[in-house]
Amino acid sequence: MSEHEGIYSSDAPVNHPENDVFQRWPFAQRVAQVIASRKNKDSIVIGIDGVWGEGKTSVLNFIRHELQNHSHIVCMKFNPWRFGDEEQLLRGFFFDLAKSVDQSLSTSTEKIGDFLKRFAQPVGAVVGQGEVVTSIGDMLGSADIEKLRQRIEKILDDQDRRVVILVDDIDRLEKNEIHAIFRLIKLTADFRNTAYVLAFDHEMVASALQDRFGSELGAGKDFLEKIIQVPLKLPEASKDSLRKYCFDGIDIALAQAGVKLDDSDVLLFVRNFTWELQKRLKTPRQATLYVNILTFSIPILKGEVNYVDLMLIEGIRIFYPSLYNIIRSNQTLLLKQVRDRENNILDKHKKEVKSLFSKSLESLNKDEAEAALELLKYLFPQLEAVYGNTHYSASYKDSWAISKRICSSLYFARYFSYTILIDDVSDQLITEFIEKSSVINVSNTVNELIKIMNPRNTEAIFSKITQNLASISDQGAKTIAIALASSAKLIPNVESYGSLFTPFSQAAMLVSDLVSKIPADSRISVAIETVSIAEPITFGVEYLRWIRTHTEEKPDPRGFKSHEIDVIGGKLAEKISTFEGGLSSLFNEFDSRVASLLNTWSKYGKEGEVNERINLWLDEEPNNAMQLLLSYLPTEWDIDSGVPKIESFKIDHYKLVNKVVDPEMIMRALNKIYQGLDNVRYYPIFIETTLQLLTAKQFSWVHKNVQQIDGDTKQEDIQEM
């Protein structure tokens, strides 16, 4: 595509041949020359047939432009839209005619306008330039019309003038108005030295006239044939001129937005446009609408989408509107990836998708339907599994996201909303954030993060930063990692049904990836700083959970060896052990998440330190035992209702507790609170009591029978022991 100056934003018709980009001028010029050179003085009615948006108005403008070169031609452009009823239409026509003819006459010549004023009584409404007349409709219904015709003909003969009346937009009138304009033409079409050039959609007008004349098939067309003496079909704009108009307009839109496509993107777009969109490009109006949309959407979405996909989906919007509406409303179905081995699911998915598109595709001809389907498969590769046998693995999602394609769930909505939704984040802001991270300190990086982050878009932020890892400098990676760790309290960390990872976990994974980018000689120091500065402290634990490791079985040059992880974990354990307020503060602040803190402390801290501290804590207050046990019971979700509930205390929970503290200490504390725990004979379930007492009895039973329980015993078998 070549660079081109100008702005393709107006849908106004063209007036001058220099602006003729659809090759209408030769046709219009020839029509005008034939009219101007015609020797026969009898009236003639020429009809130019073209569908809406095909350029009829521009052709009339060109005809008028050419007729201005002929001094004996009086050109009158009559706009029927200006008049509200038939009476006004007739009145307006004659005064427009009088005005056009009189302006071309010498001052000494009698004017038609003067004749009209004398002809009618000044009792009607004011029309034109101050003229007032009585009912023109009554006048035309009388024998006096013959006097008017003779007078007009004589003036035109004496002055050697010929009137050409151009009438446009007939097909946009109401049915009664269409009938009125043709009544007028029929009434005046026998005026000598006059010619009508009418531009309209033949099918639409014939249909409107047929309704007027009755249901007899072809009545409207028969009426038109009696009126139109020279029916002309507006030549179709060439495919080449329409395509060139679009490409030139796209060049301008891209240039105005400051966007430059690389050669591979240009090739992709041109191929898809030529093979698929161009089959539906029929009229100049379509081309103009397409260019106009891109003129606005490209700068609005600059840097936020894949430009080729944007230009193609906007093409579907103009050229395949029913398909566009389906796409916009069916993100989940279009982006769904079904593996070929899931035959039953795949068959159902194929049926759903094909049913979704069938009606729209069947409304197209064969070539258009094939082109539309190919375009759909390009924009949404997942459809290859529906209409073929090509399947894309989940790994492709990352590449589609990196390319900001419409087939990525991270970007789909942008192509239709033209904005960044509240649960998303601008790619340009992410790029700016990454660039700044290399030159500003942690505190300022946190401030920059706060500017772009809200409670609903954290996942999008972490995903976008992960996509751009390759472009982040070593310094930037360090700064962002520490900034995320130090401000993790701003990141949502609420468990929810059906969510595998919370934004909190995703942030920790991102920090792990960022630290892995840092050179080996400073990597461990950054990791230590990250866990040391983590706020809240649980973020340090979460980071340690996802830290990259380097082992003989799974070597990773950017991962940490086991002794290095011990050092990092030791620093975090030290921070936990010195937490202000001690164990009570840990439990009060972190509740169910305190178990992960105790486990980390026990695993990486000083040997026996946790056990000793908990023992003292239980001695101070036996009720702390229940707080400890409940912290190890995660929330489970009822499959049917989705309502959260606390799990029962099971053997797995007991083993986790045992790694941190001697269970005998807990049992001793519980016996100070509750009576008869040693008498629990069966594993208690669904008993009507408090959660605390139920948990105490479950712990007591497991503690008493733990030696008998085999490591492989299933929880559902415990109650039978």
Image (spheres, grey):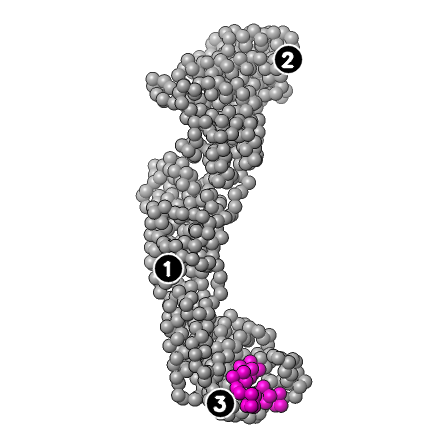
**Highlighted magenta segment, given as a residue range:** 94-119
Cα distance between the residues tagged 2 and 3: 117 Å
Number of the front mark, 1 or 3: 3
Q: Amino acid at mark 1?
A: Lys
Which image quadrant is residue 132 in? bottom right
Cα distance between the residues tagged 1 and 2: 81 Å
First in residue order: circle 1 vs circle 3: 3
Secondary structure of the residue carrying numbered label 1: helix
- Residue 600 in sight from this viewpoint: yes
Question: At x 37% / y 59%, what residue is drawn?
Answer: 243
Local crowd size for mark 3, using a 10 Å CA cut-off: few (<14), some (14–19), many (≥20): some
Question: At x 51% / y 24%, what residue is drawn?
Answer: 482
- Residue 651 in sight from this viewpoint: no
Q: Amino acid at mark 3?
A: Gln
Cα distance between the residues tagged 1 and 3: 46 Å
Q: Nearer the viewer, residue 629 or 675?
A: 629
